Image (cartoon, rainbow, N blue to C red):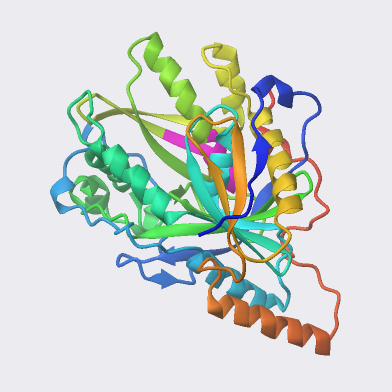
Amino acid sequence: MAFSPAAQFPIYPPPQYGGPGVAVKRPREFACFSYDKDHAFRLDDSSLKWYYPPILPADLSKGADTFVKHDDSIDEHLDSLLATIQSYEQQKGEAIDAHIVTWRGMLTKIMAAPYDGDAFEMNATLYRGSIFIEENHAFKQQKQQQENNRPRRNGFSSSLMSFWGYKFETLSTLPRPWGEISRDYIENRDNEVVNNKEQYCSVVRTGFGNSIVCIGGEVDAIWDAKPENPGEPINWVELKTSAEIREARDQVNFDRKLMKYWIQSFLLGVPKIIVGFRTQKGILTRIEELQTMNIPKEVQHRRLVSWDGNVCIKFTSLFLDWLRANITDEGVWRIRRAHRSNVIELFRVEEVGHGNIITDDFMNWRIKLSLLKTKQPTVAPSLETAPSSEGQAPPEQAGASG
């Protein structure tokens, strides 16, 4: 297959992204969806979990033999996100105003690029003024295989260490608010079957500089309850596990990990991260609560690593401007970064169509909506819960200032 010549977006050393900050729109949830215990898609919040502290200590390996694991060899594209957006648009009678539509994981890779040398590949397509971006599934599978084959110094497989994270979520959440759950359930969460097919996904409107972005991403739990008014901040909780900090080198490694913790929570407007610290053998020994907005400042204060949240934000804003200037026609485009490369490449791999990035249902809906608009012209705000005139992010989201 003959590919179009590649355009290149340079990744400069982080200090070159200094100077004035970039306006960021606070993420506002305007829709959500769930995957049930069989990973069936549901247009509701039925898989929402509530945070409740785990009982310590706990063996994170317990139950690995009964783990109900989602088959991620199946390429799900953007199907669930598009179905959720379509449902929202049908209720409002208006297309959302996003320039970019993607999963949180894709923007996490972009935001981390100035400091993280990881390779990535994504597919993108332009449809009715919006760029839709998904992960290149074949590349993802290849990376996972390489990870699975990599030997571990502590003797545990990467699959078991991944299970530890899901086990921590099971130990730390409830399927309903605390007042509706029996003491017996709370005290026996350690015996619950771990199932990562079940997920609650938030769909938010946010923005970097000139680019309005619609992001879908999984949320682990909620602290209390959703606010009555749509679009108001939600007390989400992100759950993470990490090796216990025993010496200076461990703190350095943890501060590096905190960059992605911060990015992931920043993108969806998650204000609190709860980290479960474990021994090298996977025994959960303590938990620590982190405020997302304070993480960059705390990392800079320790002076062990040098990442800067404002650099991540500015780089992302510049990249999205560049992407929108270069993807101006249909077809399927590849966004690619080689391992530790100082450029992100963009080239077209299919000259026409949209590949499997956009579903037929979504395209048919947008065509129908366009016809309805031509018959009944109106001026209505898109994403009423998140007006596009917002300026700089408020302090609870800015968080990157040191």
Q: Where's the C terminus, which quadrant?
A: top right
Position of residue 188 measured from the top left corner of the image (x, y, whole percent)? 20, 48
Q: Residue at x 40, y 58 (%)?
A: 199
Say if 78 sits above or below 233 in the image.
below
**In the picture provided, is 203 more to the left or to the right than 118?**
right
Say if 129 sits above or below 324 in the image.
below
Q: Is residue 265 part of the magenta span, yes or no?
A: yes
Position of residue 97 measured from the top left corner of the image (x, y, whole percent)? 74, 63
**In the picture provided, is 160 more to the left or to the right than 168?**
left
Q: Is residue 352 part of the magenta span, yes or no?
A: no
Is residue 63 something that shows in the picture? no
**In the picture provided, is 209 more to the left or to the right than 330?**
right
What segment carries the magenta color? 262-274
Q: Residue at x 79, y 24 (%)?
A: 19
In this orientation, which residue lies closer to the viewer: 252 or 112? 112
Position of residue 196 measured from the top left corner of the image (x, y, whole percent)? 31, 54
Residue reaching furthest to the left = 65
Is residue 8 something that shows in the picture? yes
In this orientation, which residue lies closer to the viewer: 22 or 180? 22
In this orientation, which residue lies closer to the viewer: 12 or 157? 12
**Among the 4 quarters of the image, the one containing residue 4:** bottom right
**In the picture provided, is 281 more to the left or to the right than 259?**
left
Say if 122 sits above or below 244 in the image.
below
Position of residue 74 measured from the top left corner of the image (x, y, whole percent)? 35, 62
